[in-house]
Amino acid sequence: MKRQLTKLLSLAGVSVKSQKQLENTLILEVESKSKKAICPRCHKSSSRLHQNHYSLIKDIPWGETEVFLRVNRRQFKCEKCSKPFSEELDFVKKRQKYTNRYAQNITEQVVKSDLKSVAKRNNLTESEVESMINQMSEIVLPINLKNLKRLGIDEISLVKGQGKFIVVLVDLDTGKLMGLIDERKSKTIKEYLKSWGEEILNQIEEVSIDLYKMYKTVVEKMCPKAVITADRFHVTKILHQELNQARIDQ
Ligand SMILES: [Zn+2]
C-alpha cells in the first residue's frame, strides 16, 4: 500500500510513510528518501539526524479528494559546524504551506480562466493566488520545448502589485504552461525567449499575441519563421469565460 501510494503521489525522491483518510481529505505522511542533507553553511553532507519537524502542506487534489502532505522536514546536525540545520526539499519551499506543483496547477488554471474565479473555485483568497503566481515566475518550469510549434503569449494582471503584469507563455497545442516572466519589458522577454535556444525559436510556426505592440516587435525579432496571429489565445479564453457564464445563467 505504501509503495503504491508513493508511486501514485509521484514526487521525486519522496516516499509515503503512512496515510489517513478523513471524509474528503487524504493525509499522507511523507519523507525524503535520502538519509543525508547538505549543510547550508559549509556544504558538507550530514547524516546525523537532530530532530523531526512536521507540517501540513497542501498538494494537488486526487479527483474530489483534497490531499495534504504531512511533511517531515528533518533537522540534521552538521559535524563540521556542530550546528543543526533543516534540510532543503525540492517540492516545497521553507515556510510554504503548499507544494510547488500545487502553485503551478493554480497558475495554469488562472491562465485558462481568471484570477477571481480560480480563487473562488479553489477556496483560496485572491492574494494567495497572486503569491502562487509570483512564486511560479521565480522558478524555471520543468518543460519540454521539443514539440513547441505554436506559442501563445498572454498576461495576467495582478491586483496587489498595482499595475504589475506577469507574462505567460503557453503551448497552444497542449495548453501547457511554458513559462512565466515577471516583468512586461521587451528586454526581459527577449532574454527569456533567447534562453530557449535558436533551434526552438526557429521551429515555432505561429505565435498568438494580444494587440500589445511590444510583443509583436519582440516576436518578429526572436521567432523569424513564425506567423503572428492576433490573439487566438485570448479569444479562446473569452469564449471559455462566456461559456462558463452561460452555464451559471442557466
Ligand atoms: Zn556545516
Image: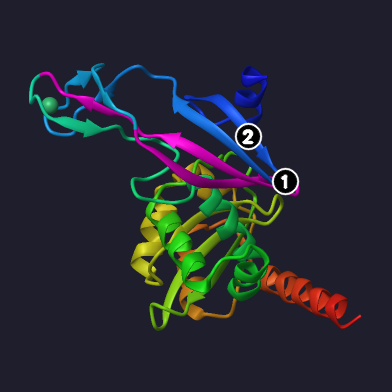
- For residue 217, side relative to residue 191 (left or right): right
Q: Residues within 10 Å of mark 2 (few under 14, many from 20)?
A: few
Q: Which residue is mark 2?
A: 20
Q: Amino acid at mark 2?
A: Lys
Q: Residues within 10 Å of mark 1 (few under 14, many from 20)?
A: few
* Residue 167 image offset from top left, x and y in percent: 48, 67
Compared with 125, 32 (above or below) is above
Q: Which residues are magenta?
A: 53-79
Queried whether the magenta region covers residue 61, the answer comes back as: yes
Viewer-proximal residue, 92 or 113?
Answer: 92
- For residue 64, side relative to residue 91 (left or right): right
Residue 250 appears in which quarter of the rendering? bottom right
Queried whether the magenta region covers residue 21, the answer comes back as: no
Count of marks overlaid on the render: 2
Per the image, label 2 sits on a secondary structure element best described as strand
Residue 23's disc is 1
Badge 1 residue CB within 8 Å of ligand 1 = no
